[in-house]
Structures are given as C-alpha cells and as structure tokens.
C-alpha cells in the first residue's frame, strides 16, 4: 500500500476555542496534587534533568579536545580545515516541547482498571504542566484515524487544560470498527512533525508502537534535529496470556477476530515468544534511530517509571562527560519494546 504524503497545514485546521474545561481541570488538579508534587521531590528543583540537551543554540566552534563529546563534531568544518572542530552550545531560556500522540484504536486497550489511553493522559498532563510552569511552551499533534489535530505551541496552565480537554473528548468518542487491513502509520505523524517544527525542541513520541513498519527512518531524521523521547505504552496482557479457555481475540488495529484456546500451553508459549521477538525488534529500532525510550505500563506507577528514567539519564550524562554514550531505555523489566501487529483479548 503506498504511503500517504504528510497533510499540508491547511488540511489540519486548528480547532475552535473550548467552552468547557471542567473535566480537564479535575484531571490536572489530581495530577498536580499527586504526581507533580512527588516529581518535584525527585528532581529537587532541577527539572532539566529530564530534558538534557534541550533548547540549545549554536554559540561557537573550537578545535576538538580530549574527552569532548564526539556527537558535537561539526563534520563540514572539520572537512574544510582538516582539523576536528566541535560545536559549542548555549542554553535557551525558553524551551518548546511537542507531544506527538498516538490515539489510534489499540490505545483503548487495558486489561484492568487503566487503558493505555489513560496512561497517555496522565503522562501528558504531568509533563505539560511541568514544562509550562517553568515558562516554557508546549504543542501537540494528535493522531487517531490519521492526523486529527495540531495544537500550536503556547505556554500557561490554561493551554495545558485545553490540551487535556481535547484528549478527554477524544477518549469519550465511541470506538470505531476500522476496515480490515487498516493500521496506524507513525511515519505520517513523524513526517508532519518534522515539517512543522522549525526550531530545536523536546519531542515526546507517545505510542504503543503497534503500527505499520517504516517509522524508524523518519524517527531518526527527527532525532537529528530535536531531543526525542519515545514513550512506549504497554499492557501486561500484550506480553503474556493467562489461561482463560477459549476466548474471542481481536486485532486492536484492524478489528479482525478469531477464536483461540488459551488453555493450550503451547499457544501461550508461542504468544509470549512472539511478544519477546517484537520487543527485541523495537529495541533495535530505537537504537538505530538514536532515541531514548521510556516504557509505561498500565499497571505501573508513573512516577516510579520516571524515577527509573531520570536515573538512566543521569548515568548517560556522566558517561557523555567522559566520551560517547548510547541511548537509554527505562522499563521495569529492562525490555522496552514491542513492534508490528498486536492481537489482544476482546473486552
């Protein structure tokens, strides 16, 4: 199937002003009293711990010195003068962050009390408010059945409320039964983001990565210009099936259904092996794209997951000070990945 070109700015009009923000206000107040207070204690006032490398402007060039980060080498200048040179940056006073949000059909799944969509709402609320209360701006691109909404980057608490309101409204929409063979195309979302973001920004790509292949290359291109964090949302039932007997199963993206016997131990083992294989593929994809990855499960505590990630980013910062450092991944099991299609029990 040929890929669709990214829509033009005119094809995704800005939504009209929002009259009612009551439910979004309740969500944000709850997050401010629970998650944000705990996160303040974790970061001890240094919220940039999470946003290392964010908001940098080129300030100067100088010759390479021992222990410089090789990622800052300017290869064009080096080729011209035949002496390695590195770029020096200065921190911007204002940061712009973008949330690239996958709200496709598979994000509605959750085996217990919370769905992946619920976790997305909490993550966006915490990080959007964390950024805006330090004077920064946030924007969002929402992907559902294709790109549905582009929210321009602005600052302030009310802007966060407007973003949360749109996500709540989206979550309340009746689930659609998509035609067979349709699937999420993250490359469309990434392509739209690359065309939109002219200034270096922090980018949160929030998805379960149950999608068509072909997104690794555009993600890598985006990471060359921006500080990108891939936030992978998962549910425990997507990795391992319990013994439920004969149950109907449905492809979360296409709606295709079939009956399976989960009492069959061999089937459950094959299901778990396929999940591990998909996770390994996604782990490689994140590494190839050069992005950090944070895993959030529907049965996980958001702040505990962020705490793990903060620890890994601090470790990478220390490693980078002494040379190069690889991208980092944070998950309870240290297995952060899932890729391709996903078949889950029907609700």
Image: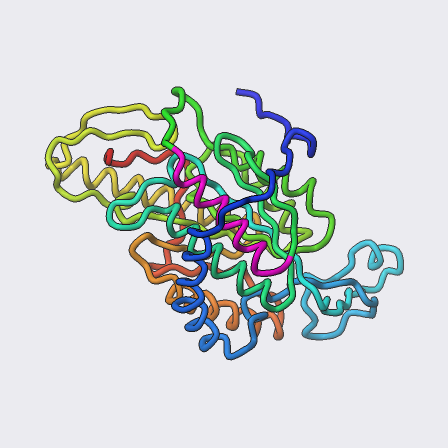
> Taking 335 as reference, is 214 left or right?
right
Query: Is 226 above or below relative to 87?
Result: above
Q: Position of residue 320 (x, y in %)?
A: 60, 70
Q: Quadrant of residue 90?
A: bottom right
Q: Position of residue 188 (x, y in %)?
A: 58, 34
Query: Is 214 above or below relative to 285?
Result: above
Q: Quadrant of residue 16?
A: top right
Instruction: Please state which of residues 209 and 116 is positioned toward the viewer in this rendering.
Output: 116
> Taking 234 as reference, is 247 left or right?
left
Q: Position of residue 275 (x, y in %)?
A: 31, 42
Q: Residue furthest front?
A: 19
Q: Indicate yes or no whether the magenta region holds residue 165.
A: yes
What residue span does the magenta drawing correspond to?
Answer: 155-173
Q: Position of residue 285 (x, y in %)?
A: 50, 45
> Taking 196 as reference, is 299 left or right?
left
Report the residue at 46% width, 56% height from top.
Answer: 25
Q: Indicate yes or no whether the magenta region holds residue 245.
A: no
Instruction: Please state which of residues 74 and 147 is positioned toward the viewer in this rendering.
Output: 147
Report the residue at 32% width, 52% height from top.
Answer: 298
Instruction: Please state which of residues 139 and 334 is positioned toward the viewer in this rendering.
Output: 139
Report the residue at 49% width, 54% height from top.
Answer: 124
Report the residue at 65% width, 45% height from top.
Answer: 221
Main secondary structure type of the part rendered in magenta: helix
């Amino acid at each position: 199937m040929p890929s669709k070109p990214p829509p033009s700015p005119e094809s995704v009009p800005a939504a009209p002003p929002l009259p009612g923000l009551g439910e979004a206000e309740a969500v944000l107040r709850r997050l401010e009293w629970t998650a944000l207070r705990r996160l303040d204690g974790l970061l001890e006032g240094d919220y940039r711990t999470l946003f290392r490398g964010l908001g940098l402007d080129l300030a100067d060039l100088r010759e390479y010195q021992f222990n410089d980060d090789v990622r800052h080498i300017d290869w064009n200048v080096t080729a011209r003068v035949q002496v390695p040179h590195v770029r020096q940056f200065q921190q911007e006073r204002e940061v712009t962050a973008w949330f690239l949000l996958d709200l496709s059909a598979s994000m509605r799944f959750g085996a217990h009390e919370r769905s992946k969509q619920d976790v997305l709402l909490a993550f966006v609320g915490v990080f959007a408010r964390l950024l805006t209360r330090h004077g920064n701006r946030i924007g969002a691109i929402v992907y559902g059945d294709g790109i549905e909404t582009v929210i321009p980057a602005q600052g302030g608490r009310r802007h966060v409320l407007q973003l949360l309101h749109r996500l709540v409204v989206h979550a309340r929409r009746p689930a659609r039964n998509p035609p067979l063979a349709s699937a999420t195309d993250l490359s469309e979302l990434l392509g739209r983001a690359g065309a939109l973001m002219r200034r270096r920004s922090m980018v949160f790509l929030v998805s379960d990565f149950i999608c068509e292949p072909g997104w690794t290359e555009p993600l890598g291109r985006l990471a060359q210009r921006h500080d990108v964090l891939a936030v992978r949302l998962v549910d425990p039932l997507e990795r391992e099936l319990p013994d439920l007997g004969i149950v109907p199963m449905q492809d979360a993206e296409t709606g295709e259904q079939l009956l399976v016997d989960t009492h069959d131990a061999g089937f459950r083992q094959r299901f778990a092996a396929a999940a591990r294989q998909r996770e390994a593929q996604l782990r490689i994809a994140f590494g190839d794209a050069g992005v950090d990855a944070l895993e959030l499960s529907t049965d996980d505590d958001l702040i505990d997951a962020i705490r793990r990630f903060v620890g890994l980013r601090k470790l990478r910062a220390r490693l980078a000070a002494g040379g190069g450092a690889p991208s980092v991944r944070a998950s309870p099991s240290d297995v952060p990945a899932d890729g391709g299609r996903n078949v889950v029990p029907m609700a």
